[in-house]
Image: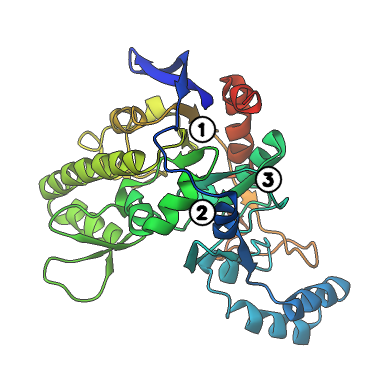
């Protein structure tokens, strides 16, 4: 039994109002051994690669060592690691329960401890940040936290992970989901492929949904509104499917630089919907989705940008954009605020006491 803060809505504002008890007696009983085996992971970074990192830290301007390290990094099946390895060490792993997908390292891990699961897009993964909120959540509650964040993820992706994900989630103490972007959802007649890629009605290779939206913004705004309307229905329904699959307590987080009340409805300002994560998700849609969760955490922070600093030399370098600063991904301040708001709303206190 776990006690959480229940969310309700009052005058379109998110408020915490009561405590609810979540009983899991209907869940099939599984042995501790089964759960422990599924949550075990294999680190993707080899000892040879770690030795190269140590050598580069001692001699950060050695071009030969950098080239060797780059060659190793390109073999790691994790997009963010390959892109940012000189700036942030994401230390990707693969879990026994989900052997086909690499995820960010869970951080400090104590064998035999209970665990929680966090899931969502790049914000949850912690792209560009040293300490994602999953690390801080583990420290605050003295538990292990499995970070299943995936770049460009949509609710579809977690449904498509199948029984491995369902079992991992339902053996957890609780699950945290992010408010993901609407651009990663496949509205009919498109079919979801992976992340923000879809299969067009005529078939063929997967394509990204965002260029399709941008093209319609230019050519046919009314058609864009119609497509977004369909996407909203799919988005809401897939979140509901996820909530039905997961029987343990569920927390929804909003990780953005824009306040929820400041998000315009897509039909009122199409171009603005493209600008800030989570794209095209407005207050009304968040409210619909959040009703399937046991707690809501608004962690938005109006933040600026983060500098790229080489982790071996300590020198300022450039992000993948070719610029020294980035503001696209959730900054460290937003991750810090997830924990601060969990504390402020009483969620952490209730989780600690049970």
Q: Which residue is mark 2?
A: 148
Mark 3 or 1, nearer chain start: 3
Q: Residue at x 26, y 33 (%)?
A: 265
Q: Mark 3 packing: few (<14 Cα in 10 Å), some, or many (20+)?
A: few
The secondary element bearing badge 1 is classed as loop
The crowd level at tag 1 (other Cα within 10 Å; few <14, some 14-19, many 20+) is many
Q: Where's residue 74, x and y in %?
A: 58, 79
According to the picture, the residue beneath numbered tag 3 turns out to be: 113
Q: CA distance from mark 3 to mark 1?
A: 30 Å
SS under mark 2: loop
Residue 152 visible to the viewer: no
Given residues 245 and 192, the one toward you in this image is: 245
Left or right of 205 in this view: 336? right
Residue 341 against residue 134 in the figure, above or below: above
Q: Residue furthest right?
A: 58
Cβ atoms at labels 3 and 1 below 8 Å apart = no
Q: Are marks 1 and 2 in contact (CB under 8 Å)?
A: no
Q: Residue at x 63, y 58 (%)?
A: 105
Which mark is first along the chain, 2 or 1?
A: 2
CA gap, disc 3 to disc 2?
Answer: 18 Å
Instruction: Label 3: state its secondary structure.
Output: loop
For mark 1, what is the residue? Answer: 300
Q: Earlier in the sequence, mark 3 or mark 2?
A: 3
276 on left or right of 232: right
Q: In this orientation, which residue lies closer to the viewer: 128 or 297?
A: 297
Residue 136 appears anywhere in the view:
yes
The C terminus, quarter of image: top right
- Compared with 226, 254 (above or below) is above
- Residue 45 position by quadrant: bottom right
The percent coordinates of residue 157 (x first, y second) are 36, 56
The reply, left or right, for residue 256 in relation to residue 205 is right
Q: Position of residue 117 (x, y in %)?
A: 53, 46
């Amino acid at each position: 039994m776990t006690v959480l803060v229940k969310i309700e809505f009052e005058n379109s504002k998110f408020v915490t109002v009561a405590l609810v008890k979540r009983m899991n007696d209907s869940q099939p009983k599984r042995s501790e051994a089964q759960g422990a085996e599924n949550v075990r992971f294999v680190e993707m970074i080899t000892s040879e690669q770690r030795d190269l990192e140590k050598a580069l830290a001692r001699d950060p301007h050695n071009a030969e060592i950098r080239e060797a390290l780059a060659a190793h990094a390109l073999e790691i099946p994790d997009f963010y690691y390959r892109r940012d390895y000189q700036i942030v060490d994401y230390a990707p792993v693969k879990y026994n329960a989900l052997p086909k997908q690499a995820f960010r390292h869970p951080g400090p891990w104590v064998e035999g401890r209970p665990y929680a699961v966090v899931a969502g897009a790049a914000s949850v993964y912690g792209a560009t940040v040293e300490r994602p909120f999953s690390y801080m959540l583990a420290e605050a509650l003295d538990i292990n936290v499995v970070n299943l964040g995936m770049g460009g993820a949509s609710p579809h992706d977690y449904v498509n992970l199948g029984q491995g994900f369902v079992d991992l989630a339902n053996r957890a103490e609780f699950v945290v989901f992010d408010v993901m972007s609407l651009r990663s959802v496949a509205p009919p007649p498109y079919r979801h492929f992976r992340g923000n890629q879809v299969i067009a009605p005529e078939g063929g290779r997967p394509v990204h949904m965002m260029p399709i939206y941008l093209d319609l913004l230019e050519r046919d705004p009314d058609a864009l509104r119609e497509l977004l309307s369909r996407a909203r229905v799919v988005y809401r329904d897939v979140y509901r499917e996820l909530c039905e699959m997961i029987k343990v307590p569920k927390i929804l987080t909003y990780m953005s630089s824009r306040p929820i009340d400041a998000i315009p409805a897509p039909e009122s300002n199409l171009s603005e919907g493209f600008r800030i994560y989570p794209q095209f998700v407005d207050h009304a849609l968040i409210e619909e989705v959040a009703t399937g969760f046991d707690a809501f955490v608004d962690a938005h922070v109006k933040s600026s940008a983060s500098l790229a600093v080489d982790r071996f030399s300590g020198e300022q370098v450039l992000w993948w954009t070719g610029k020294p600063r980035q503001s696209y991904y959730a900054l460290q301040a937003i991750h810090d605020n997830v924990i601060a708001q969990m504390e402020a709303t009483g969620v952490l206190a209730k989780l600690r006491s049970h």
